[in-house]
Amino acid sequence: SWAILEFNDQTRITLRPNTVFRLDAYRDDAPESMLLGLAKGGMRVVTGLLGKRRPDAVRIHTATATIGIRGTEFDARL
Protein backbone atom coordinates (compact mmCIF):
# COMPACT_ATOMS: atom_id res chain seq x y z
CA SER A 1 0.00 0.00 0.00
CA TRP A 2 0.93 3.67 -0.23
CA ALA A 3 2.12 5.74 2.73
CA ILE A 4 2.25 9.51 3.18
CA LEU A 5 4.63 11.06 5.71
CA GLU A 6 4.29 14.71 6.68
CA PHE A 7 6.98 16.43 8.76
CA ASN A 8 6.85 19.49 11.06
CA ASP A 9 8.22 21.74 8.29
CA GLN A 10 5.42 20.59 5.91
CA THR A 11 7.66 18.31 3.84
CA ARG A 12 5.47 15.54 2.38
CA ILE A 13 6.82 12.18 1.25
CA THR A 14 4.59 9.71 -0.57
CA LEU A 15 5.97 6.15 -0.63
CA ARG A 16 4.91 3.72 -3.36
CA PRO A 17 4.03 0.08 -2.58
CA ASN A 18 7.00 -2.24 -1.81
CA THR A 19 9.34 0.66 -1.03
CA VAL A 20 12.31 0.31 1.33
CA PHE A 21 12.91 3.76 2.82
CA ARG A 22 15.08 5.15 5.66
CA LEU A 23 14.93 8.36 7.61
CA ASP A 24 18.55 8.73 8.68
CA ALA A 25 18.27 12.24 10.15
CA TYR A 26 15.64 14.91 10.62
CA ARG A 27 16.17 18.05 12.60
CA ASP A 28 13.93 21.11 12.32
CA ASP A 29 15.91 23.29 14.72
CA ALA A 30 19.44 24.66 14.29
CA PRO A 31 21.31 23.17 12.55
CA GLU A 32 18.45 22.02 10.30
CA SER A 33 18.92 18.84 8.27
CA MET A 34 17.07 16.01 6.55
CA LEU A 35 18.78 12.86 5.33
CA LEU A 36 16.66 10.22 3.59
CA GLY A 37 17.55 6.87 2.05
CA LEU A 38 15.82 4.97 -0.74
CA ALA A 39 16.92 1.36 -1.19
CA LYS A 40 14.05 0.09 -3.36
CA GLY A 41 10.74 1.31 -4.74
CA GLY A 42 9.68 4.88 -5.32
CA MET A 43 8.80 8.07 -3.54
CA ARG A 44 7.49 11.54 -4.29
CA VAL A 45 8.82 14.38 -2.17
CA VAL A 46 7.55 17.94 -1.81
CA THR A 47 10.02 19.83 0.34
CA GLY A 48 8.72 22.15 3.03
CA LEU A 49 10.18 25.07 4.96
CA LEU A 50 13.50 23.32 5.63
CA GLY A 51 14.14 22.94 1.88
CA LYS A 52 13.22 26.57 1.30
CA ARG A 53 15.37 27.97 4.13
CA ARG A 54 18.37 25.66 3.68
CA PRO A 55 18.27 23.76 0.37
CA ASP A 56 21.71 22.27 1.05
CA ALA A 57 20.38 20.61 4.24
CA VAL A 58 18.09 18.16 2.38
CA ARG A 59 19.74 15.04 0.94
CA ILE A 60 18.51 11.75 -0.53
CA HIS A 61 20.85 8.74 -0.65
CA THR A 62 20.28 5.83 -3.04
CA ALA A 63 22.43 2.83 -3.95
CA THR A 64 23.93 4.70 -6.91
CA ALA A 65 23.52 8.43 -6.19
CA THR A 66 23.13 11.20 -3.66
CA ILE A 67 20.58 13.86 -4.56
CA GLY A 68 20.79 17.40 -3.18
CA ILE A 69 17.41 19.10 -3.23
CA ARG A 70 16.94 22.79 -4.02
CA GLY A 71 13.50 23.38 -2.51
CA THR A 72 11.36 21.60 -5.09
CA GLU A 73 9.11 18.68 -5.88
CA PHE A 74 10.41 15.43 -7.40
CA ASP A 75 9.86 11.68 -7.93
CA ALA A 76 12.49 8.98 -7.43
CA ARG A 77 12.13 5.29 -8.41
CA LEU A 78 14.56 2.41 -8.13
Image (cartoon, rainbow, N blue to C red):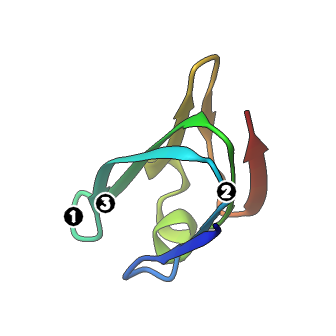
Q: Separation of disc 2 and disc 1 at Cα? A: 34 Å
Q: Which residue is mark 1?
A: 30
Q: Quadrant of the C terminus?
A: top right
Give the mark nearest the N terminus, 3 or 2.
2
What is the crowding at mark 3: few (fewer than 14 residues within 10 Å), some, or many (at least 20)?
Answer: some
| Closer to us: 24 or 71 | 24
Tell me the tag on residue 52: none
| Closer to us: 21 or 69 | 21
| Closer to us: 45 or 3 | 3
The residue sitting at 59% across, 47% down in the picture is 19
Vertical order, 6 against 3 (above or below): below
Q: Separation of disc 3 and disc 1 at Cα? A: 5 Å
- For numbered disc 3, what is the local secondary structure? loop
Mark 3 and 1 residues: CB-CB less than 8 Å, in contact?
yes
In the image, what residue type sits under mark 3?
Glu
Residue 41, percent from left and from top: 67, 42
Residue 72, percent from left and from top: 72, 63
The residue sitting at 50% across, 82% down in the picture is 10
Q: Which residue is mark 3?
A: 32
Q: Is residue 53 left or right of residue 24?
A: right
Q: Is residue 56 left or right of residue 42?
A: left
- For numbered disc 1, what is the local secondary structure? loop
The residue sitting at 60% across, 40% down in the picture is 68
Q: Which residue is mark 2?
A: 17
| Of the two numbered discs 3 and 2 in the rendering, the one whose residue sits closer to the viewer | 2
Image quarter of residue 55: bottom right
What is the crowding at mark 2: few (fewer than 14 residues within 10 Å), some, or many (at least 20)?
Answer: few
Give the mark nearest the N terminus, 2 or 1.
2
Vertical order, 65 against 12 (above or below): above
Residue 12, percent from left and from top: 57, 74
